[in-house]
Amino acid sequence: MEVTVFLGIGSNIEPRNGYIMKALRLLTADEHITFRQLSSKYRTRPFGITDQGEFLNIVAEIGTDYSPVELFRVVKQTEELTGRVKREKWGAREIDIDILLYGDSVYQSDQLDIPHKGLMSRDFFVIPLLEIYPDAVNPGTGEKLSTILFDAENSFIAGKYEPEEESIR
């Protein structure tokens, strides 16, 4: 049975947009993943280690019949195939793909937390997610994401990214 999943995807190593598009092409080429919709791309300040380049972040809605663990494996493999190089935590990266929501499931393991443990505190997840899923709810708490307020101090979004349009196909 196909489950609706929301992925947070970001890059801060050039070509940022190219890495995002390559990852989307790889994901949607998988026969167990159906692309549904994509948020706008947002320019965002880095989280964690702040002395690095600006990120591009998006949220993609997909359908999949993968389990959370299987999808996590596919996501990590997609990061590798897209060209991600292992570096320090929160450091610069070619691509970063996070599973934000997996249906209305709550899942925790040593490697994976669903919903994503940073979902409620990172506007670069919440704002693009609400753009394509305005009724989003944290299945762990029942809290509507639309009730979260971000002030200037805890906001990372610098603006929308407005390049020429590109297709993931």
Image (tube, helix red, strand yellow):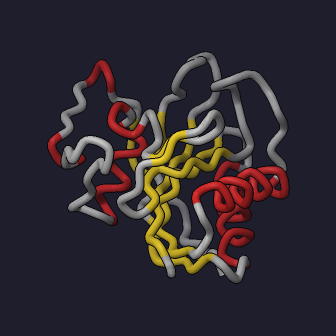
**Relative to 87, is 79 above or below?**
below
Q: Is residue 115 toward the left or the right of residue 94 in the image?
A: left
Residue plotted at (62% across, 76% down): 33
Please tell me which residue is depicted at 15% across the width and 42% down the height of the picture: 147
Residue 140: % across, % down:
32, 44
Q: Within the image, what quadrant is residue 71 found in?
A: bottom right
Q: Between residues 64 and 97, which one lies in front from this camera angle? A: 64
Which residue is at 19% across, 49% downward? 144
Q: Residue at x 49, y 54 (%)?
A: 58
Q: Does residue 72 appear in this view?
A: yes
Where residue 56 sits: x, y (%)? 55, 46
The quarter in which the C terminus is drawn is bottom right
Residue 11, located in which quarter of the rendered image?
top right
Residue 31, compared with residue 94, is above or below; it is: below
26 relative to 115, above or below: below
Q: Is residue 46 left or right of residue 15?
A: left
